[in-house]
Amino acid sequence: MIRKIILEGDPVLRKVSKEVTVFDERLAMLLDDMADTMYKADGAGLSAVQVGVLKRAFVIDTGDGLREFVNPKITKSSGTNKIKEEGCLSIPDRFGYVERPEHVWITYQDRNGESHQDKLSGYAAKAFCHESDHLDGILFIDRATKIKKYN
Ligand code: CO
């Protein structure tokens, strides 16, 4: 099911999302809906807060399939990402130049509550950092060195 994406200016995007403690059918439905909503909007990532749910969860597809992250954490990062441009489904009229790490070491849970660890690089690392920020109420415009309007 497609959900409504909350746009910048709505105070909910500035809230800190809460740890997920219940891994039930509702969470599964939320993650399914987030993926539907992200693909419909042609995005590479979407956090639960962007559909108004203050849970620490997001979905990403940076070109190699859908990935779901619940209670994600960055434990270590290194390098500087070569991709500078960054956009957000909640800020559809602008993009910005944001510095992100090239590599991130992460821990997260899946929709069943199983714990995982992984290392992401490049675009995936950038998307992971962007979505992690959403969970703490941070938007790319807070970090951007330059912000431009789409023509
Ligand atoms: Co965003």
Image (cartoon, grey):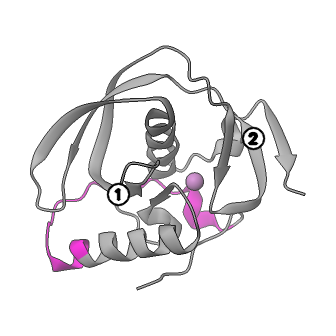
Picture disc at residue 23: none
Name the side, left or right, on which 53 lies relative to 75.
right
Among all residues in the image, which is located at the extreme bottom?
1
Residue for badge 2: 96
Q: Which badge, 2 or 1, is on the more N-terminal residue? A: 1
Residue 65 percent location from the top left of the image: 35, 54
Is residue 24 shown in magenta?
yes
* Discs 2/1, front: 1
Residue at left offset 66%, top offset 42%: 86
How many marks on residues?
2
Q: Quadrant of ligand 1?
A: bottom right
Asked if disc 2 and disc 1 are in contact, CB closer than 8 Å, the reply is: no
Left/right of residue 34 with respect to residue 13 in the rendered view: left
- In the rendered view, tell whether residue 117 sits above or below residue 16: above
Q: Which residues are magenta?
A: 10-28
Front residue (pair 58, 125)? 125
Q: Position of residue 3 (x, y in %)?
A: 48, 81
Q: Quadrant of residue 20?
A: bottom left
> In the rendered structure, which amino acid carries the disc numbered 1?
Leu
Mark 1: secondary structure: loop
Give the residue at the far front of this rendering.
Answer: 64
Q: Is residue 21 magenta?
A: yes
In-front residue for pair 148/132: 148
The amino acid sitting under disc 2 is Gly
**Disc marking residue 66:** 1
Residue for point 38% across, 77% down: 33
Quarter of image, res 140:
top right
Would you place residue 137 above or below residue 144 in this image? Answer: below
Quadrant placement of the N terminus = bottom left
Camera-side residue of 27 and 66: 66
Residue 116 pos. (x, y %)? 15, 40
- Helix, strand or loop under label 2: strand
